[in-house]
Image (spheres, rainbow, N blue to C red):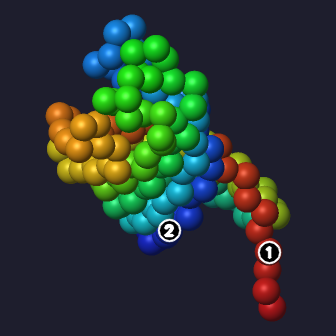
């Protein structure tokens, strides 16, 4: 068994955003940027390779808080969503606060590793806020739910 604490800086792009409450799940943004911080406690079962110890791999689970900021560009908005009273075309930010659970496998070779991972948040321990203001009023109906599939490729360096 192996236990560790860790953190990841998250940066990236996201695709279109739809509003389920609008007719036909209309597009309200064609994309945007995302940034966040994921911290975690990880526990794993190390699969020792006795012939090549530098190739040990690990099946792991992790749990920890994650903060995400998503900037939506407000471009590509559909006909209904373009109404001035909805204010989607101006773009907006969303801030998510979640407890993240993940399951993954770390394939390790001498100098690099490949790590596929599935992440999901615990919905009852999640919150969100936004700068989007239709007619100056924002309502939160549900806690955010996030599913993510990641593939991390890492290069290992030794400092002596």
Figure quadrant of residue 64: bottom left
Image position of 148 (left or right of 86)? right
Q: Between 88 and 125, which is closer to the camera in this rendering?
A: 88
Where residue 107 appears, as percent x and y from the top left, is 68, 49
Q: Nearer the viewer, mark 1 or mark 2?
A: 2
Q: Between 41 and 17, which is closer to the camera in this rendering?
A: 17
Q: Between 109 and 100, which is closer to the camera in this rendering?
A: 100
Gap in angstroms between the C-alphas marked 1 and 2: 18 Å
Decide: is 159 above or below 58: below
Which disc is residue 157 wearing? 1
As drawn, the residue found furthest toward the top would be 24
Image position of 114 (left or right of 116)? right
Neighbor class of circle 2 (other Cα within 10 Å; few <14, some 14-19, many 20+) is: few
Decide: is 5 above or below 52: below
Q: Residue sitting at 62 percent across and 49 percent down?
A: 12
Q: Are marks 1 and 2 in contact (CB under 8 Å)?
A: no
Image position of 55 (left or right of 131)? right
Q: Between 109 and 74, which is closer to the camera in this rendering?
A: 74
Where residue 14 appears, as percent x and y from the top left, is 58, 39
Where residue 70 appears, as percent x and y from the top left, is 47, 49
Q: Earlier in the sequence, mark 1 or mark 2?
A: 2
Neighbor class of circle 1 (other Cα within 10 Å; few <14, some 14-19, many 20+) is: few
Q: Can the viewer see residue 41?
A: yes
Figure quadrant of residue 111: bottom right
For label 2, the SS is strand
Where residue 120 appears, as percent x and y from the top left, is 38, 41
Q: Which residue is mark 2?
A: 7
Q: Residue sitting at 67 percent across and 58 percent down?
A: 56
């Amino acid at each position: 068994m192996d236990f560790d604490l860790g953190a990841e800086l998250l940066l990236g792009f996201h695709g279109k955003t739809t509003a389920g409450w609008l007719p036909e799940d209309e597009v309200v943004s064609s994309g945007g940027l995302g940034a966040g911080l994921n911290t975690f406690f990880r526990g794993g079962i190390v699969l020792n390779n006795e012939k090549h110890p530098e190739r040990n791999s690990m099946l792991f689970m992790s749990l920890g808080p994650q903060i995400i900021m998503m900037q939506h560009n407000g471009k590509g908005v559909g006909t209904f969503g373009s109404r001035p009273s909805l204010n989607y075309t101006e773009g907006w930010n969303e801030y998510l606060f979640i407890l993240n659970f993940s399951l993954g496998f770390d394939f390790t070779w001498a100098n690099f590793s490949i790590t596929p991972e599935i992440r999901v948040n615990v919905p009852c321990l999640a919150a969100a806020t936004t700068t989007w203001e239709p007619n100056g009023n924002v309502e939160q109906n549900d806690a955010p739910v996030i599913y993510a599939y990641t593939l991390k490729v890492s290069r290992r360096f030794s400092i002596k």
